[in-house]
Amino acid sequence: MIYNWNSNHPDETAAFAFKIGELLKAGDVLTLEGDLGAGKTAFSKGVAKGLGVERTVSSPTFTIMKEYMGRLPLYHMDVYRLGEDGEDLGFSEYFEGEGVCLVEWAHLIEEQLPSKRLEISIMYEGDLKRRFELRPAGKRYEELCKEILR
C-alpha cells in the first residue's frame, strides 16, 4: 500500500518529519528519494529533531554518512556520490544496528538495503508544496505509516 501526505509549506514538512522521528525505534530504516532540491535534507533535519538530535544536521553528500546522537543514534547517509555502482561500504552494520538509518538516494544501493524499510519519495507540487509517498515494506512500517497519518 502507498500512503500519501501533502505539505503546503516547509514548516508543515518539518512538523511531519518531526512526528516521524518521534515514532522511530532502534533498527528502523527509512529511504528518501526525490529530485535535487526536493527537500530530502530538510526532511532529514525534522526527523533528527524528532529523535532529539540537538546538533545542526547537514547533508552528508561529501562524507557519505554522518552520525548524530539523540535518544537513538541517527545514521544519515547520502549515497548520491557512490553512483550506480553502489559500492559496498559496510552499510549493513548500520542497517542491523541499534540506531535509525536515513538513506538519501537509496536506489543507488538497492541490493544492500534491508527488505523491511520505509521508502519515502518527495515530489514537487509547486513552489513550496510537496507530496510525500510512503511505501512501507514490512508490518512494522505499515503500522508506523498508520500512526504517522493518524
Image (cartoon, helix red, strand yellow):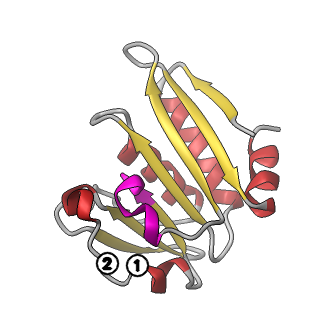
Q: Is residue 79 visible?
A: yes
Q: Is residue 149 above or below residue 139?
A: above
Magenta span of residues? 103-112
User: Can residue 55 be seen?
Assistant: no
> Do the residues bearing badges 1 and 2 touch, measured as CB atoms within 8 Å?
yes
Q: Amino acid at mark 1?
A: Phe
Q: Which residue is mark 2?
A: 88
| Residue 85 within the segment the image draws in magenta | no
Mark 1 neighbour class, 10 Å CA radius: few under 14, some 14 to 19, many 20 or more = some
User: How far across and down, in percent of the image, does residue 70 sit?
Assistant: 53, 73
Q: Would residue 111 be counted in the magenta stretch?
A: yes
Image quarter where the N terminus lies is: top right
In the rendered image, the quadrant that contains the C terminus is: top right
Q: Mark 1 or mark 2, which is nearer to you?
A: 2
The secondary element bearing badge 2 is classed as loop
Which residue is at a point 31% across and 70% down the rendered structure image?
65
Question: Which numbered disc covers residue 62?
Answer: none
Compared with residue 125, is residue 77 higher up or lower down, i.e. above or below? Answer: below
Query: Which of 72 and 83 lies nearest the eye of the viewer?
Result: 83
Asked if 134 appears above or below 79 in the picture, the reply is above
Q: Secondary structure at mark 1?
A: helix
Amino acid residing under circle 2: Asp
Which residue appears at 45% of the width and 27% of the height? 123
Label 2: few (<14), some (14–19) or many (≥20) C-alpha neighbours in 10 Å: few
Q: Which residue bears the numbered disc 1? A: 91
In the image, residue 28 above or below residue 91 = above
Q: Relative to residue 106, is residue 62 drawn left or right?
A: left
Distance from disc 1 to disc 2, alpha carbons, whole Å, reads 7 Å
